[in-house]
Each structure stands twice: as C-alpha cells, then as structure tokens.
Amino acid sequence: MAAGPTVKKIMDTYQGKIRLVIKNYPYQYRDYSHIAAEASLAARDQGKYWEMHDLLLKRSPKLDRESLIGYAKELGLDTKKFAASIDGKKHAQEIERDKKLATDMDLYNTPTIFINGRKVVGERPFEYFKKIIDEELKNDKKY
Amino acid sequence: MKRSMLVMVFVLLAVSASAEEKRYQVPLGDSPTLGPPDAAVTLVEFLDFQ
C-alpha cells in the first residue's frame, strides 16, 4: 500500500521545498506487488516513472500483467520493450536492494515514510505530515 | 560573561532535549526522485503499489 493522495497533496503544497524519493517494498504474498514495482521501473527506463507511479496507485489493485501493459500503452510507452522488461524481471536486483534496506531497517508496513529521517508508519492524514514538515522547514535556515 | 555562558549551556540542553526524536539515515541511492535535490525536506516513501 501507498500514501498516494496524501503524498500528492504534500508535494503540491510544498512544491519546490520538498523532495520525494520512492523505495519499493513489495509484499511477498500479494500477487502483483512485484510485477507492479517492475512496471514502475520499466516506465522509468522510458522516462515516464512518475506518470506510471500515479497510474498504478490510481488503478491498484488491478495490476495483473495485461492491465500493466495496457497502462504502458495508455502512457504512450513502447509496449514491446515494456513487456520484455517486466517479463524478464529486469529490475529485480534494484527491487531486492530496496527490500533488503527495508528489512534491515525493521520496516514491517507500507507505506512507511521518512521525513528528514523521522519515521511515520502507515497511513496518516495530511495534517499529521504537515505538522512535521512545517517543523522541519522552520528548523531550516533557508526558509 | 559567566552568566551568559550559563544561559548558553541551558539553551543548548533545552534544544537537545526537544530534538531527541530518532532520525534514521535512509540511503537514497539512485531511487526515483521528484523535486529539487537541495530541498529542505526529503520525504522517502517505502511503498507497495498493490
């Protein structure tokens, strides 16, 4: 799971002051978690990571192979290259690296969010994040 | 002079006490990134699309 609309609102509200970094932590026992992560990175190879990221969050849990290829087509990607990438698990190593990082950090839930290193586990309302972000901005001399 | 030193120490103690919340170091690597690299706030999200 992900904090889709909340993160989107944060990025809109604090545009220019905040940077978002995504780590994949696909759950082992969900059918499409891994292939969806592969799809996001396959889209990245074609310069459309964020478009795919947003689309996956919007259409989740409809994330089977055929649906993913449909999304790639919708975004104007080269679907042949895209399909080869997800079928060949081209980004497995990168995904495993993120998973190892997550387990090394004892994370057990998605979404888990770090705001300048401060941990927020699970879904929280926008106001919860806003309070932390405003504190961080206040502590930063630039603003 | 001595007095101002004492005040300084007190202020430093107060600041460190209020900032004791743990901060984790998350290596960013070459993960997908949106927004300015020198932004004051970095938000790292571990997610599962499903």
Image (cartoon, coloured by chain):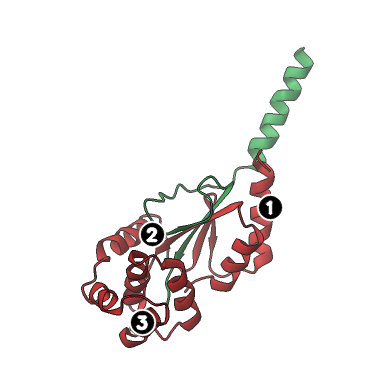
Chain colours: A red, B green
First in sequence, mark 1 or 2: give its number.
2
Q: Nearer the viewer, mark 3 or mark 2?
A: 3
Q: Position of residue A23 (x, y in %)?
A: 41, 61
For the residue pair B43 and A70, the one nearer the viewer reads as A70
Q: Position of residue A118 (x, y in %)?
A: 55, 52
Q: Chain of mark 3?
A: A
Say which amino acid is labelled 1: Asp
Q: Chain of mark 2?
A: A
Residue of label 1:
A134
Residue name at image x 49 percent, y 63 percent: A112
Residue A37 as seen in the image, left or right of residue A120: left
Residue of label 3:
A68
For the residue pair A130 and B22, the one nearer the viewer reads as A130
Residue name at image x 32 percent, y 87 percent: A66
Residue of label 2:
A102
Residue A4 as seen in the image, left or right of residue A76: right
Say which amino acid is labelled 3: Leu
Residue name at image x 24 percent, y 71 percent: A89
